[in-house]
């Protein structure tokens, strides 16, 4: 990849679990930034933690990205398919003196650190295998497979102007010679990430601020690979972590943290994106905006320096907004899937669309929509309390009349409404008495949208059966 001025961003998840909400947010920022500047967005799977990486996780990540609609222009690139490239770069670095083989065994390193601790020093690799002019290195032991370490510059300061946090400086003496290639030939994160960002001509790296401490190494390795000739380094933007609603780091123990969990809980992708966008970025006071608007606005400024707090109530509010906006046909499809997870086979999509139209204003999630709609497919049972309150002896004669009338009318909302009005007049009762009684029997709850509209969703047979034993 030649380096041009084109903006190129990437998301680089490790396939050791689901797609975390924090990674989804960084993916959104990276994607929106590339789109804003007419650049490209790359998806890279960082699978060098061989013991913890799984195919199942790769698939979860890909399907989460697809569900969110954050389309990548290149990739997925798998690091484990690029080993030959990493090995070639390592050889070049060894030849250039910016990397070296280290034969220290784990036991030796433990002893070394013990001694450092005993002297009250901060533990660090002491450079025993690092070549230096005039230094005589021990003969490489034949029975030890070496690792390769990066020869970090011994002094000077690494500085970058972080897109989120502003200028950051770290002194080289605080960082030691990092292992870049393990002795099984697998590169470490900090090395593979640099070779890839370099090869893929990445210009802007957005990621979580847990990586800030890695960045000085990465910048130094970049310089070693790209040469000191002013080759362009990516710009880095480290976003603060997302806090749970208890103020602690958002984690599995504190509720759902995967994108798929929210999909399964009935959230819409555009709601997730809108909500995630605002967790760490703002455009004036705008709370509800489309992805197109975000692309228009997202230029890497107004990223928050301090951590945002996950707010389930706000997410539900945002989702409710998008549920209201969603077409009934689209909701019908989502509803069908949601009902299927409950063992309800609802084949009639037009019925589900009508149900969505009627119930969606009351729902924050598709799960809630399914809670409403399931009354059409499974038996209902109101609570004893509701039955006692609404199914009074005074209303029962009216219910019987209504049942008889409903058996005879054409089956639609208007005729059902007429039958109800006639029943009210005949028995001198009020809608406020009749409607709740019908609701508890037919819907299993005393409150619903307009009862004539709700009844029209059912078949006549179903309604009559539920009114049968009055
Ligand atoms: N694989 C790293 C992670 O999942 C990527 C970090 C980065 O973007 O450099 O945290």
Image (spheres, rainbow, N blue to C red):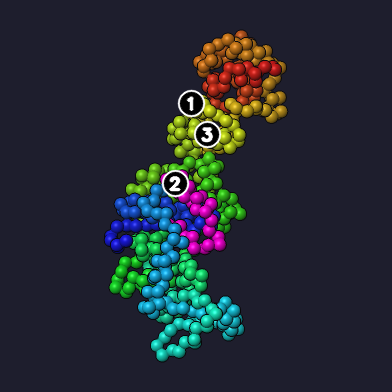
The stretch in magenta equals: 43-69
Residue 88: % across, % down = 39, 70
Is residue 46 inside the magenta stretch?
Answer: yes
Q: Which mark is residue 66?
A: 2
Q: Distance between the residues labelled 3 and 2?
A: 20 Å
Displayed quadrant of residue 380:
top right
**Furthest residue toward front:** 142
Image quarter in which the N terminus is found: bottom left
Q: Viewer-nearest of labels 3 and 2?
A: 2
- The reply to whether residue 430 is visible in this rendering is yes
Element type where label 3 sits in the image: helix
User: Residue 118: x, y in percent?
Assistant: 60, 83
Q: Circle 1 sits on which residue?
A: 350
Tell me where residue 159 sits by quadrant.
Answer: bottom left
Q: Residues within 10 Å of mark 3 (few under 14, many from 20)?
A: many
Q: Which of marks 3 and 1 is nearer the N terminus?
A: 3
Q: In this view, does 430 lie to the left or right of 469?
A: left
User: Residue tagged by mark 3?
Assistant: 335
Question: How many numbered marks appear?
Answer: 3
The image quadrant where one finds the C terminus is top right
Marks 2/1: CA–CA distance:
27 Å
């Amino acid at each position: 990849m030649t380096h041009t001025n084109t903006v190129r961003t990437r998301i680089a998840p490790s396939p050791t679990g689901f797609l975390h909400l924090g990674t989804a947010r960084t993916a959104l920022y990276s994607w929106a930034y590339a789109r804003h500047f007419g650049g490209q967005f790359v998806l890279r799977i960082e699978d060098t933690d061989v013991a913890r990486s799984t195919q199942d996780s790769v698939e979860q990540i890909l399907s989460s990205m697809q569900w969110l609609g954050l389309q990548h222009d290149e990739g997925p690139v798998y690091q484990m398919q690029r080993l030959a490239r990493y090995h070639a770069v390592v050889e070049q670095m060894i030849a250039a003196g910016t990397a070296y083989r280290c034969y220290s065994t784990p036991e030796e390193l433990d002893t070394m650190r013990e001694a450092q601790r005993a002297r009250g020093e901060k533990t660090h690799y002491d450079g025993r295998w690092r070549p230096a002019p005039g230094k005589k290195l021990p003969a490489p032991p034949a029975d030890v497979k070496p690792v390769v370490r990066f020869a970090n510059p011994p002094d000077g300061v690494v500085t970058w102007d972080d897109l989120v946090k502003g200028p950051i400086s770290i002194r080289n003496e605080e960082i030691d010679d990092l292992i870049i290639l393990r002795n099984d030939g697998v590169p470490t994160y900090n090395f593979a990430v640099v070779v890839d960002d370099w090869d893929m001509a990445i210009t802007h790296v957005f990621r979580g601020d847990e990586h800030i401490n890695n960045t000085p190494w990465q910048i130094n390795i970049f310089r070693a690979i790209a040469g000191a000739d002013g080759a362009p380094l990516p710009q880095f933007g480290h976003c603060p972590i997302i806090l749970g609603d208890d103020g602690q780091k958002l984690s599995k123990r504190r509720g759902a943290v995967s994108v798929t969990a929210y999909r399964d809980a009935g959230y819409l992708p555009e709601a997730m994106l809108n909500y995630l966008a605002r967790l760490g970025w703002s455009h004036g006071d705008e709370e509800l905006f489309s992805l197109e608007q975000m692309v228009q606005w997202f230029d890497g400024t107004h990223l928050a320096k301090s951590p945002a707090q996950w707010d389930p109530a706000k997410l539900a509010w945002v989702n409710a907004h998008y549920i209201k906006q969603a077409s009934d046909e689209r909701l019908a499809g989502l509803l069908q899937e949601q009902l299927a997870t409950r063992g309800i086979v609802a084949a009639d999509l037009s019925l589900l669309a009508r149900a969505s139209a009627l119930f969606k204003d009351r729902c924050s999630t598709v799960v809630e929509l399914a809670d409403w709609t399931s009354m059409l497919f499974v038996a209902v049972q109101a609570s004893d309390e509701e039955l006692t309150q609404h199914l009074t002896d005074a209303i029962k004669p009216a219910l019987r009349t209504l049942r008889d009338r409903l058996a005879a009318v054409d089956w639609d909302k208007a005729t059902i409404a007429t039958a109800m009005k006639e029943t009210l007049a005949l028995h001198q009762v009020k809608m406020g008495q009749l409607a709740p009684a019908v609701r508890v029997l037919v819907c299993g709850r005393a409150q619903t949208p307009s009862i004539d509209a709700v009844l029209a969703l059912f078949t006549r047979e179903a309604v009559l059966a539920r009114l049968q034993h009055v």
